[in-house]
């Protein structure tokens, strides 16, 4: 039996969830209200951080300027990517502050050195990619067999993929590096996923990636080749801006065995579905587990409002020749309100040592919680 405290917490959570649902469905301006909440979540107080910056980036809308600690312009260019890259490359280590403004990027910002901070003044600092098949920011290097960098922070700005003008674009890519922090970032208009993934069998497996207090507006995140990470206190809004993508968060993605995800904590995130672009969405998964291999992952204390398809799903097929594995997965204390829209709240197709407990799942069209007979060593209890 659940204790009294747990029941009280559940009741409060239900009230909050219902309020959020009503807010979303209450009128034409509902999505704007949600975005206001999102903006307040990612906006840090605007404080004077110029003194702590090694370089300051400014734009007048045409030219982008790089200033040193003394306020002297040391570089300028009509190509914002060139200016920001100059500042990063000039650092042995330290901080680059990007002032409020929109910076159109002809190329990705590449960070391949350690102990670097790229920080905006607020989410009104916008880095917008202007070229197909590209990134706003790329940390590390794809396919590298050795660690490229560590201790990198991206903070307090907006990454804009430029979709649909730019078709296939990504806010951030993280490869072959350790100790990465992404916080207070607003992701929007990305026609491709944000890749926290591996690209080859031999690529160095990244460690300790933290994504927190961010807003993903119609934008997906994919994980693979990672040992240790935290995804917490983020908000996922609406449906994918691109019809190619139908999953918000992929845990362990790709067609290589190096895509194993281990020791990931996914907690206190909120999924809000605003019914935008609903006509092009085939299915919608909040969290997709185990495209290939996922181990020692905790999915806890998240709120899902009206997922389309599934709230949390274990994929039940895989590319030929790839090991299918999900072990030691804990799904606990999640609130999933399907509102007669999703077929399943929680769908577990395979795995070993799977715990599903203390979840509140309501109004799935087929079954609130489904666990296949092929799942071994499963614990399912105290769900509502």
Image (cartoon, grey):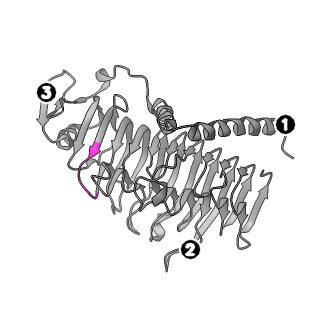
Q: Residue at x 21, y 43 (%)?
A: 81
Location of mark 3 (residue): 73
Which comes sooner in the sequence, label 3 or label 2?
3
Q: Earlier in the sequence, mark 2 or mark 1?
A: 1
Q: Which residue is mark 1?
A: 4
Predominant secondary structure, magenta span? loop
x 28%, y 43%: residue = 128
Residue 366 visible, this angle = yes
Residue that protrudes farthest toward the front in the picture: 28
Measured as percent of width and height from the top left, residue 79 is found at 15, 42
Label 2: element kind:
loop
- Say which residue appears at 58% left-offset and 48% top-offset: 266
- As helix, strand or loop, the secondary structure at mark 1 comes to helix
Of label 3 and label 1, which has the lower sequence position?
A: 1
Instruction: Specify whether residue 226 is in view.
Output: no
Q: Relative to residue 88, is residue 56 depicted above or below? A: above
Label placed on residue 317:
2
For this view, does 33 lie left or right of residue 102? Answer: right
Q: Position of residue 187 (x, y in %)?
A: 40, 44
Of 49 and 44, nearer the camera is 44
């Amino acid at each position: 039996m659940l204790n009294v405290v747990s029941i009280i917490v559940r009741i409060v959570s239900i009230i909050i969830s219902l309020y959020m649902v009503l807010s979303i469905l209450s009128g034409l301006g509902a999505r704007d209200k949600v975005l206001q909440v999102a903006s307040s979540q990612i906006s840090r107080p605007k404080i004077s951080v110029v003194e702590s910056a090694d370089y300051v980036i400014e734009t007048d809308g045409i030219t982008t300027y790089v200033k040193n600690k003394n306020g002297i312009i040391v570089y300028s260019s009509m190509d914002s990517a060139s200016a920001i890259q100059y500042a990063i490359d000039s650092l042995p280590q330290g901080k680059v502050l990007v002032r409020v403004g929109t910076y159109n990027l002809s190329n990705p910002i590449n960070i391949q050195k350690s102990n670097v901070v790229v920080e905006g003044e607020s989410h009104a600092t916008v880095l917008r990619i202007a070229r197909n098949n590209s990134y706003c920011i790329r940390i590390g290097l794809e396919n590298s067999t050795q660690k490229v960098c560590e201790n990198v922070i991206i903070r307090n700005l907006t990454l804009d993929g430029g979709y649909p003008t730019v078709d296939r674009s990504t806010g951030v890519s993280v490869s072959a590096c350790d100790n990465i922090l992404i916080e207070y970032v607003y992701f929007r208009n990305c026609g491709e996923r944000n890749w926290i993934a591996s690209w080859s069998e031999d690529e160095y497996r990244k460690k300790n990636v933290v994504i927190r207090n961010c807003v993903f507006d119609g934008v997906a995140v994919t994980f693979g080749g990672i040992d240790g990470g935290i995804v917490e206190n983020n908000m996922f809004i609406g449906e994918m801006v691109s019809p190619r993508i139908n999953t918000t968060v992929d845990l362990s993605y790709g067609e290589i065995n190096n895509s194993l995800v281990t020791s990931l904590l996914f907690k206190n995130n909120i999924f809000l579905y605003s019914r935008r672009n609903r006509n092009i969405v085939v299915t919608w998964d909040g969290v997709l587990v185990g495209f290939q291999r996922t181990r020692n992952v905790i999915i806890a204390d998240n709120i899902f409002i009206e997922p389309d398809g599934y709230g949390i799903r274990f994929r039940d097929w895989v590319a030929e020749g790839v090991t299918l594995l999900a072990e030691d997965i804990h799904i606990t204390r999640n609130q999933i309100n399907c509102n007669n829209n999703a077929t399943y709240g929680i769908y577990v197709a395979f795995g070993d040592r799977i715990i599903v407990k203390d979840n509140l799942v309501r109004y799935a069209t087929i079954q609130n919680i489904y666990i296949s007979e092929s799942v071994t060593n499963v614990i399912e209890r105290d769900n509502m």
